[in-house]
Amino acid sequence: MSFERKVCVENTAENAVDLAAELVKITICESLGLRSGCCVALSGGSTPQRLYQRLAQTSTGEDVPWGATEIFFGDERDVSLDDVASNYRMAQRTLLDHLPIEPQRIHPIRGDADDLDAAATEYEKLIRQIVPIGPGNIPRFDLILLGMGSDGHTASLFPGSAAVNEVHKLVVAHNVPVVGRRRITFTLPLINAARNVILFVTGDDKADAVAALLSDDPAQRQRFPVACVQPTDGLLTMVFDTAAARRIKT
Ligand code: 6PG
């Protein structure tokens, strides 16, 4: 394994939320120490909601220079931005509405576009305009937050989907049979170009996937797209609660 990885296990989901929130704040502050801006991609689903609420409760414009951050989304569903299933809507209500970030620094994916392929292409262009380009001519996020499904998917990179093997495009739209809908998602080249990735996973239902992810057996790991998250020149920090980590072989 040639990338840097840290694994943190907290006793409770609440403690895992606290740790993840502190790591997000530290990462943003450190990034702004390096340069004048900070580009962050948020994850969706249900797990990060408590994390976003905690960030909204515990960080203000003074301790975390949110006003200098650019907010993106690692994936989105094929719904309107005000749909209850929208990752943007979830992040807006739990976090972004409570932070001193100008609207023009918040960049939702247009999951409601008639042409999702064009929307994915446009989002990649936007990322290239705003996020500093790193090695390999790939934009380098300061922080990408990721979750994981019980099937080992992350962002909207699901087992068996061609998007997992995409090596040229940085953002793609694709059909996801297991959810019966289309999704727009970051691809692994973009994720693995990040300076920092935080994988935040809690809950008993994720225990098998977490154990496989951390397995010494490549055959176990390779079943899950999340195992392909290996930041080339960055740090992957995994934050679990004991429920999600209960099957890790120590
Ligand atoms: C999404 C997320 C996805 C999520 C996992 C876990 O759009 O659903 O981006 O990758 O992190 O599906 O979802 P839960 O946190 O709801 O279990």
Image: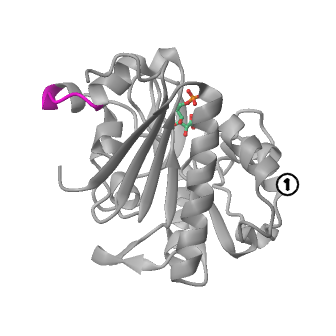
Question: Callout 1: helix, strand or loop?
Answer: helix
Q: Nearer the viewer, residue 26 or 1?
A: 26
Residue at the disc numbered 1 = 98
| Residue 172 in view | no
On screen, 12 above or below 21?
A: above
- Residue 151 point in image, percent of width and height: 40, 23
Residue in the picture at 28% in, 44% down: 228
Residue in the picture at 54% in, 62% down: 27
Residue in the picture at 32% in, 57% down: 231
On screen, 163 above or below 35?
A: above
Q: Nearer the viewer, residue 200 or 166?
A: 200
| Horizontal arrangement in the rendering, residue 212 relative to residue 101 (left or right) | left
- Residue 214 point in image, percent of width and height: 28, 31
Q: Quadrant of the C terminus?
A: top left
Disc 1 residue lies near ligand 1 with CB under 8 A: no
Queried whether the magenta region covers residue 216, the answer comes back as: yes
Which stretch appears magenta?
214-219
- Type of amino acid at the residue the image marks with label 1: His
